[in-house]
Amino acid sequence: MGAWFLYGLGTENPNLPGYLVLCPGRPVRFSILWNSAFLPSQYQGTYINHSTIDPEKMLPHLSNTRWKHATQRQQLDLLQQLNAAHGMTRGDDSILKARSEAMETAYRMQFEASDAFDLNRESKHTRAAYGTGQFANGCLLARRMVERGVRFVQVYYGNGQPWDTHSGHNKTVPKLCKNIDQPIAALITDLKQRGLLDDTLIVWGGEFGRTPVSENGNGRDHNHHGFTMWMAGGGVKGGTSYGQTDDFGFKAVIDKVHIHDLHATMLHLIGLDHKRLTYRHAGRDFRLTDVHGRVVHEIIS
């Protein structure tokens, strides 16, 4: 999804990656969760481990201590010329192009990234509003990226899959919920106070839902038949609930929203027509929504 958004809209800040992935530690399945599939690889996410909020540790080797910026620029210009000459004999190579773009972005990040990722520049009042913990730091970093023109920011709760509660559900979930409530509320409030919420679409969700019945006596199993996503900002109608499950909370039965509908609606909210945003691959034009998708106008203000 992030790759499609970046492909469709581009980025507003060439000094930072257009699609950032913030996760403290290592998420399960790792880069498959933010790659670009058949889209050119320059649209894939850039992973940042914010286990520590020290910018030098989040972004190791960011600054070149050996060569001045002017010398680095000369080196990159020469490298681009060599790559262009190489490409003339090989045809279009999206992987090589992505590598070249990555080097350019890394060079430009020296001028802005250290400041952008430095949470110590935030006031004590703002830090207190978000609370403590890695998810709180991720939400605050997301706001700092959004206000600097990063197109898509993906924030993971924590290392691994803490929410995969097949056991110990009654003990684990209340703590997890408590840890996310304050940072999420602070993020929405912060964006609104800064005039950014109208132009920023927040989407919260997980892999899928959980069964309404117990698994192994103290856990919940996976359930893709009925689950909740919520949105804020970006033209979404506030205080609106759409769709219902059955009486057991197991399966969506009224006003069902397919994942293609969700994607179509998200693209619509950021100004893109999901039927017209295509990429030619393997002989045909592909869409994020394939050949499906309905914009859920009922939730749009």
Image (cartoon, grey):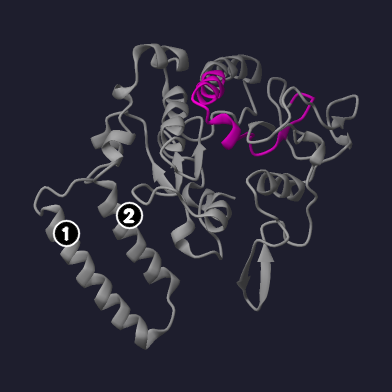
Q: Left or right: where does residue 132 sit relative to residue 85?
A: right
Among numbered discs 2 and 1, the one appearing first in the sequence:
1
- Farthest-out residue, front: 195
Name the image quarter holding residue 173: top right
- Tell me what residue is drawn at x 71 percent, y 27 percent: 220
Q: In this rendering, does residue 104 appear at all? A: yes
- Tell me what residue is drawn at x 68 percent, y 24 percent: 219
Residue 235 placement (x, y as % from top left): 68, 35
Report the front residue among 248 and 290.
290
Report the front residue among 244 and 25.
244
Q: Compute the Cα span from label 2 to label 1.
A: 13 Å
Q: Left or right: where does residue 88 sit relative to residue 176?
A: left
Report the front residue among 31 and 81.
81
Tally the numbered discs: 2
Query: Residue 21 colored magenta?
Result: no
The kind of secondary structure element at disc 1 is: helix
Judge the density around disc 2: few (<14), some (14-19), many (≥20) Cα neighbours within 10 Å. Answer: some
Residue 57 placement (x, y as % from top left): 26, 36
The residue under label 2 is which amino acid type? Thr
Position of 277 relative to 51 (above/below): below
Query: Residue 206 colored magenta?
Result: yes
Judge the density around disc 1: few (<14), some (14-19), many (≥20) Cα neighbours within 10 Å. Answer: some
Say which residue label 1 marks.
72
Say which residue label 2 marks.
105
The residue under label 1 is which amino acid type? Gln
- Tell me what residue is drawn at x 65 percent, y 79 percent: 283
Position of 265 relative to 103 (above/below): above
Please give the range of residues in magenta: 185-214
The kind of secondary structure element at disc 2 is: helix
- Tell me what residue is drawn at x 62 percent, y 72 percent: 280
